[in-house]
Image: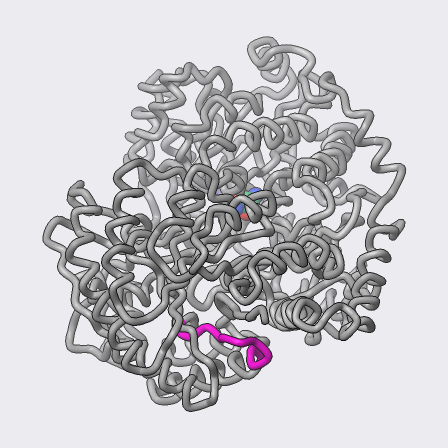
Amino acid sequence: MVKTHNLGFPRIGKKRELKFALEAYWRGETSLIDLEQQAAELRKKNWNSQKKLDFSPVGDFSFYDHVLDTSLLVGNLPRRARSELSELDQYFQAARGQTSKAVEQTSVAAAEMTKWFDTNYHYLVPEFDADTTFELHAERYLSYVREATQQGVNAKPVILGPVSYLWLGKSKDDSNKLDLLPKLLPVYEALLNLLAKEGIEWVQIDEAILVTELDKDWQHALNQAYFALNKTPVKLLLTTYFGSLKENLQLACELPTAGLHIDAINARDEVIKVVDWLPPHKVLSIGIINGRNIWKTDLNATLDWLEPVYIRLKQRLWLAPSCSLLHVPVDLNSETDIDTEVKDWLAFAEQKLDELAIVATALNEGRDALAAELAENANSIAHRENSTRVHRSDIQQRLQSVTDAMANRQQPYAERAELQRSKVKLPLYPTTTIGSFPQTTDIRQTRQLFRKGEIDFTAYQAKMHQQIQLAIEEQEKVGLDVLVHGEAERNDMVEYFGEQLDGYIFSRFGWVQSYGSRCVKPPIIFGDIARPRAMTVDWINYAQSLTDKPVKGMLTGPVTMLNWSFVRDDQPRSDTCLQLALAIRDEVLDLEKSGVNIIQIDEAALREGLPLRRAEWQDYLDWAVRCFRVTANGVANETQIHTHMCYSEFNDIIESIAAMDADVITIETSRSDMELLDVFNAFDYPNEIGPGVYDIHTPNIPNAEYMKTLMKKAAQRIPAKRLWVNPDCGLKTRQWAEVKPALEAMVEAARELRQSQ
Ligand code: GLN
Ligand code: ZN
């Protein structure tokens, strides 16, 4: 018999119950006991959903983040967060920098947050130094195990492996993190011994770093760790996900553990190799259901390749989703309003577990036992495959007709720049902003009323026009050189465009945890992308009609649209991206035709799409950059293309950034003292740059002197002629009372810089 299990269940709840419980506690409206109770209810619901499996994960639930949970478990919360407060309050303090209002208010610096492998989930980075020591704090963890057992759950505790834990953290004193492994292992051993005492047989131990490029030291650390941990009485299921094992395949197979989990969604081609290599006493868990997307699995096709594997492995075969279901929404049944045709193609966490159970039964009892379910699945898969909403020949044809010429500007930058300067007269150090202005309650309410149908388009448009007018007036008063319309009509930079494109749908409750209590609801790209009509032209033209200053058109780029959506699994990401590129290219050309001379195409998420393995970076960067170029480069020489990126780590991708060939790139730099421009300097980056001088993440108002100093530092690296002056990012999260004086100071700084030339 094959066994089924799950690597992790979404912890946030069907209706984001955990989010609301946490935020109420942080606001001081509920007590710790209330919060604990609400969390226990959620865990119970989650385990109930998983009862159909042979093993359910325990320890996957988290009040904020499972990496921070591990820090708590091994006694490594940042020192500054350790206090007399309750354990959970110390934990929240480490996560958020402040305690909840329910307890005495104190604050310390929050731990740094970064992306969990190549997902949009963010974890709290463990902090280490040479003196770091570890100490087991297993009370909470063990209480979850007991709670599960009492509820009749066949518990398989989940822990982050010790080597991945070190790999994910940061050394604060440049000491070697791996030197800490001998100190960390006894804590893991002690935990595993305690779990054995609780009657636990299997423990899932996550070492996703096995799908990344590891040097000898890290490979050695894995050996060292598992030789030690294998001596404990529990059976370890070494768990990998998010990619292929490649050169680590043999290592993963041979590490001394009782079982191995691999991701057959990302590495189907490795399954047979692993079956060949795996020592005969080991269990192999195969991740057959995609834990990263929202599509139904083709169950019949899965059985086709899985049945021969089952014949070879027999009871040594386990089945699971490819990775934790943390990365998908909870329950498709909550979506009562979604397009029913597309809904039939989807599966969220609950449905994915049903799929898992069906595959297992079909293997155990033969496909006939589940003929009806399998036929139904085949039906949905066939509908999707043949749908003319998914596959549109007009769009396919257009895709085939993309030429290299479409991706190229007519003249090189230096020549275009002259033409652009004569078309739009700008001073040295031109000032601008990144696009959005404060999203006031009034704006949000108006959008909501319109959405609910409580006001009609004319009323909505009039309100938005007022907002645009306000933004233009304020920018003129401040004296900015290139204006924006302010993006009042946009709730989100991806959703706004997705809603107007064919091929996209939106869920109502499809929330996925991003960090802590914060969730995102990624739009779903289900079919070929087309733009039925212009999306932004009227708003920008209205803004331009109010002023003699140039107004920038404002778009989201194809790579960002792609990386912040759930995407199709029936064609390469690069194809979907090119479809997006063509749709947005049409918008660029429509803007240009309507008289807009400056167009910004934001690519906030370009870097996020980088694959886990460096060896695969170039391929991604090549098609991503090409898509951007197809979007942007159909314009005349005189039209100026801007792009914006919300980060500033360009060291390893500068060549590709330059290859985008945007006339101007604005980036986030204010907190780096302009050192981040060094790489542009070293590379002789040829085009114009707007290094952010105003940190928009805090309410602080920067002064002119400070911004002038920053720009002088910038001018030591980039010729003044090619510099712009702008904030780090959009201003939508700020208040007008902060924005006005900050921008006045920024414009003042630019004026003084011009005078001192
Ligand atoms: N134009 C967008 C804005 O100003 C850019 C946002 C972003 O880069 N994240 O809000
Ligand atoms: Zn930004």
On the picture, is 15 further left or further right than 121? right
Magenta span includes 56: yes
Relative to 438, is 151 above or below?
below
Res 451 quadrant in image: bottom right
Answer with the quarter of the image where residue 335 lies.
bottom right
Residue 299 at x, y percent in the picture: 72, 61
Applied colour scheme: one colour
Is the residue 580 above or below the residue 732 in the image?
A: above
Residue 150 horizontal/vertical position (percent):
41, 90
Residue 304 in the image: state x and y as whole percent.
72, 55
715 w.r.t. 82: above or below: above
Residue 475: x and y, percent? 54, 41
Please tell me which residue is depicted at 79% across the width and 42% down the height of the picture.
534
Report the span colored magenta.
Answer: 49-59
At 37% from the left and 18% from the top, the residue drawn is 681
Q: Nearer the viewer, residue 493 or 59?
A: 59
